Image (tube, rainbow, N blue to C red):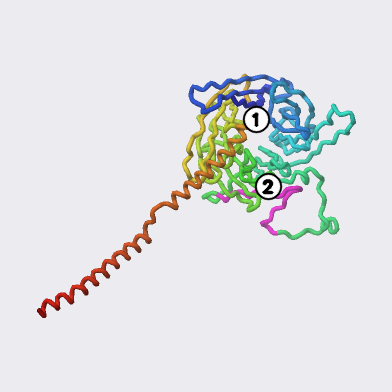
């Protein structure tokens, strides 16, 4: 029986550990899914939980980071078989103001990244291991300022780049190492500080550490500029290795559109699907655990599965009674969500078809929902539970099935009867042979007629 654990945070400052035990085999309407909800951390005086992240320390220990509305961030360690968490580190964003909010949080091999809506980016290194006898000095935290009015911030899986976007802030990709170092003037500016370089009018000036910035979509049919309002971001790493996992970016907007950017080709979106979330804004966007899967939630309680090969909605889940504000893909083809109606929901995520524009063989379903005390604000998978042998082989089986389907389809096309020009040519050749045979029969009959006349 696979067990999946997630962590949730709510507006009361509570952190909860939720385990869902799903029976093996096909899930039916009468399938019983047991749920265990345990409050593991209570800090009501430090405000609402705004962002959470899970990750691994370089020594392999599992970590949970929690960012709160008062600017406090805590780092906890946890184990797979127990619901207890242990506080390891705590710090405060000194530049935090009352109107600020955490819009990004991520655990990397170097430490914990945090970013606020006012563009305050911080890298907090891990504390020295207290179990070692040697005293290691604590590395200082690194900070920098990004543009203001941000809505989302994500660190790439390879940790070399991060992306951000917001209200009148275009989707931008930055080099992590360069962004956290001080800006250094170029040699030409140092030699001739008063001389300005001539630049093309259409060439944008990138900020320090910025390697790519998106360009706004064309004006509408009235030739009016379309506003820039990015609300959710995600790196799409299907078919790519860890080294180039930052090249494709998915962005959701306040107008309900979903766009794909390829930083290797151009600044404009390679795909712009404007009617994914009609009459609503995108709240969260997550890349699925299988290829060609993107999950999107909107402000009107709907969750969609999008095929990035053509932008079509593969399936839509039943609507909740409140806006779905956070999504968390999990192993065994599952997706979890939390919404403003106090519920956590578990969905199935069947794999997409082998080729684009094919019918979805199976639709995703809502299989379980659990009421939570307090309004949840975020949900994250613990990164460990459910990653057993079964979860590891599911993706391999899916790839093998797609390969078999492609071979069978190709074999069907090869065995089809040829029609059209080839058949006409065959018919014409048959007609010609019939004409020739008739002429030969006539020639053979002529001498017989002459002999009859002579006789």
Which residue has dot 2 on it?
244
Q: Left or right: 191 with respect to 36?
A: right
Q: Nearer the viewer, residue 42 or 293?
A: 293
Residue 336 within the magenta-colored segment of the rendering: no
Q: Residue at x 44, y 53 (%)?
A: 414
Residue 215 seen in the figure:
yes
Task: Look at the image and give the residue range highlighted in magenta.
Answer: 200-219
Q: What is the CA distance from the residue labelled 1 to the residue labelled 2?
A: 24 Å
Q: Quadrant of residue 167?
A: top right
Residue 300 visible in the displayed image: no
Query: Percent from the top left, x then y, of residue 259?
Result: 58, 44
Q: Is residue 225 above or below residue 432?
A: above
- What crowding class fits label 2: few (fewer than 14 Cα within 10 Å), some (14-19), or many (20 or more)? few
124 or 57, which is in the foreground? 57
260 over 92 or under it: above or below: below
The picture places residue 354, in percent across and down from the top left corner, at 52, 43
Which one is in front, 54 or 3?
3
Seen at 74% across and 27% down, the residue is 70
Quick one: label 1, few (<14), some, or many (20+) residues within 10 Å? many
Q: Name the quarter where the C terminus is drawn.
A: bottom left
Where does the image place residue 187, in percent across and percent down from the top left?
83, 57
């Amino acid at each position: 029986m696979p067990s999946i654990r997630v962590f949730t945070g709510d507006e009361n400052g509570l952190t909860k550990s939720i385990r869902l035990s799903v029976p093996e085999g096909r899930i039916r309407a009468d399938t019983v899914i047991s749920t265990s909800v345990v409050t593991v951390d209570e800090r009501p005086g430090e405000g609402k939980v705004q962002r959470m992240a899970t990750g691994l320390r370089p020594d392999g220990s599992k970590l949970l980071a929690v960012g709160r509305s008062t600017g406090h961030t805590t780092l906890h360690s946890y184990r797979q078989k127990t619901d207890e968490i242990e506080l390891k580190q705590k710090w405060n964003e000194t530049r935090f103001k009352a109107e600020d909010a955490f819009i990004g949080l991520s655990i990397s091999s170097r430490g914990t990244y945090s970013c606020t809506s006012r563009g305050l980016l911080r890298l907090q290194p891990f504390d020295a291991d207290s179990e070692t006898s040697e005293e290691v000095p604590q590395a200082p935290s690194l900070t920098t300022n990004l543009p203001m009015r941000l809505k989302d911030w994500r660190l790439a899986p390879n940790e070399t780049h991060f992306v951000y976007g917001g209200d009148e802030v275009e989707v931008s990709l930055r080099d992590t190492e360069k962004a956290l170092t001080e800006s250094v003037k170029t040699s030409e500016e140092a030699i001739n500080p008063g001389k300005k370089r001539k630049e093309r009018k259409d060439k944008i000036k990138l900020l320090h550490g910025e390697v790519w910035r998106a360009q706004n979509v064309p004006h509408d049919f009235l030739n009016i500029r379309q506003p820039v309002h990015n609300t959710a971001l995600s790196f799409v790493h299907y078919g790519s290795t860890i080294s180039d996992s930052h090249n494709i970016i998915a962005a959701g907007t306040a107008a309900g559109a979903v766009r794909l950017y390829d930083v290797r080709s151009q600044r404009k979106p390679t795909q712009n699907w404007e009617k994914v979330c009609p009459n609503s804004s995108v709240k969260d966007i997550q890349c699925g655990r299988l290829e060609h899967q993107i999950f999107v939630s909107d402000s009107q309680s709907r969750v969609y599965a999008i095929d990035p090969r053509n932008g079509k909605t593969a399936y839509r889940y039943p609507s909740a009674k409140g806006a779905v504000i956070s999504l968390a893909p999990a192993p065994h083809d599952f997706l979890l969500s939390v919404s403003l109606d106090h519920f956590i929901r578990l969905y199935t995520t069947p794999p997409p078809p082998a080729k684009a524009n094919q019918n979805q063989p199976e639709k995703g379903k809502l299989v379980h929902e659990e009421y939570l005390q307090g309004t949840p604000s975020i949900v994250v998978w613990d990164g460990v539970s459910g990653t057993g042998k079964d979860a590891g082989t599911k993706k391999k089986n899916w790839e093998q099935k797609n390969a078999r389907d492609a071979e069978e389809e190709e074999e069907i096309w090869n065995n089809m009867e040829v029609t059209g020009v080839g058949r006409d040519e065959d018919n014409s050749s048959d007609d010609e042979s019939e004409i020739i045979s008739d002429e030969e029969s006539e020639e053979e009959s002529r001498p017989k007629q002459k002999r009859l006349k002579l006789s």
